[in-house]
Every structure is written in structure tokens, then in C-alpha cells.
Amino acid sequence: MKATPRAKYLHTNLNATKFSSDGFLRDAQRPFDEIITGDLRRLFWKILALIMIFGMSAQTQAGISEKRECGIMGGMTAARLWGDHVTKESWSPGGWFGTYLLIPVADNLNFRPEINFNMRGYRYLYTNENDLQGDKSEAILRLNYLDFPLLFQFAITINESLVPDVVFGPYTAWNISATARNKFGDSEISDDIDSVRKYDLGVIAGGRLHYSGHFYIDLRGGAGLLPIVDKSNPPRKYNLWILAGLQYRF
């Protein structure tokens, strides 16, 4: 059997002698997705270690005098998927809430660990040929996560009255529940899904703007880097969401 370009690439870069179309590296007995997951997980922990080392070093050298800040936050989310063959999905509404800690590490730079509950998934409408009334059928996937973002925050001065804070960095997440809901006219079916990956890794970027007193307006978006389905050769579909809400600084 003639080797495909992808098989040659895997042989050269992963020391794999065989690669079948079902997604397995048979000689190593490891799924291709498992290798990607392991690489991303190791990369995430390396980034975390570098953040902690950098933070402790910068705080020692700069002699930071600012006080630490903590607070709570929450609001609304809109989620869908990105990746292969995701042309039908529309944004699914949800909510989020959590808490954060702001640790100064350098001049105009803060380390911002968070713990958040975040609702993700997708939703789309489609025409059901068996529905004689011609009503639209609806499919919704609800994914609830406990997120652990590890962010950096710094301020950008636009003018004297407009100084937004920018946040960015990686996150890891644990899936709490996964439910599929299908609605056909007046009928509705809901089922729990056990094939959704229990953890996720990704990136977050956004910002906050002071509103009044201890309140801030929060806008951000996030994208997952692991397929949401946990199996050997999953469809390449990843979490994608945006959120808006308020933060309260204690």
C-alpha cells in the first residue's frame, strides 16, 4: 500500500511506521489524538511553570508595593464550535460566574488566576423532513465547565478617562456535565453524553473597563485547543465562546 503524505510526515516526525485512516498509530498502540493531547498538556504545564517563575522573579526584582486585588464576576455567554464541518451551528446562550485574584508582578503587569463556572456548547435549527407541519427542529449541546484561567493583565491608556485593562493567557477546564437536547415540534428528547472529553485546554483574550466604584465591565472570548469528543479519531470540533458581564472588586 502506497504511503500517503500524512503517513510519511508521521513516520518522520513521530517515529511511527504505520498510520491507518481510523486515526491509530498501530505500532505504538497510541491514537494520534492522544499524542496531540499529551503534547498540549505538557505545553500547558510548561507555560504555567514559566508564568510562576516569571511572576516570582519580577516581584522580587521590582519590589512591588501595590496591594493584591480579588473579586467576583459573572454575566452571559454565547457559545458555539469551531473546526471541521461546523457550518450549521449558531450561538447558544448561557451564563458564567466566578472569582479572581490579581497579583502584581511588575510595573503595569499582573498575574490573574481565576476559577469560573462556564456554560458552553452549540445550538442550531434545521428542517425535519418528517415534520408534516414544517416546523424547524432544534438541536442543542450543553457543556458545563469549571474553568481555571491563568491570565496576565495590563492597562492600556487611550486617554485620561479611558484606561481599559487587557487580559490574556491559557486556561484548563474540567467538564462537569454534557447534555444533548433535540426538539421535534412539540416533542423533546434529552440525554447525557459520555463521549465528551472531561478536560479542555485553550486560550482566553479580552479586557475589562472601569464602570463605577468597584464595578468593571468584562468582555472576553475563549477558544479550546482539544476536540470536545474523547475518542481515538474524533471530529475536529472545538469549543468557542464569548462572554460579557460585570466584575466587582473587593
Image (spheres, rainbow, N blue to C red):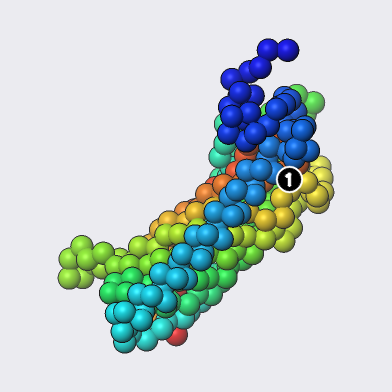
Vertical placement of 17 versus 146: above or below? above
Q: Is residue 88 visible?
A: no
> Tag count in the figure?
1
Comparing 232 with 229, the one in front is 232
Q: Amino acid at mark 1?
A: Asp
The answer to whether 161 appears left or right of 77 in the picture is left
Q: Is residue 48 visible?
A: yes
Q: Residue visible at 71% across and 50% down?
A: 197
Comparing 244 with 36, the one in front is 36
Q: Residue visible at 68% across and 37% down?
A: 32
Q: Residue furthest top?
A: 2
The N terminus lies in quadrant: top right
Q: Residue furthest left?
A: 160
The C terminus lies in quadrant: bottom left
Q: Position of residue 38 (x, y in %)?
A: 65, 49
Query: In the rendered image, which quarter is residue 147 located in?
Result: bottom right
Comparing 226 with 82, the one in front is 226
Q: Residue visible at 79% across and 26% down?
A: 130
Element type where label 1 sits in the image? loop
Q: Residue visible at 46% across and 81% down?
A: 70
The answer to whether 53 appears left or right of 14 in the picture is left
Q: Position of residue 56 (x, y in %)?
A: 42, 76
Q: Position of residue 231 (x, y in %)?
A: 75, 41
Q: Which residue matches tag 1?
A: 230
Comparing 34 with 197, the one in front is 34
Q: Position of residue 136 (x, y in %)?
A: 68, 34
Query: In the rendered image, which quarter is residue 54 located in?
Result: bottom left
Vertical placement of 4 versus 72: above or below? above
Q: For label 1, count other residues whose C-alpha is less than 10 Å away and answer few (under 14), some (14-19) or many (20+).
A: some
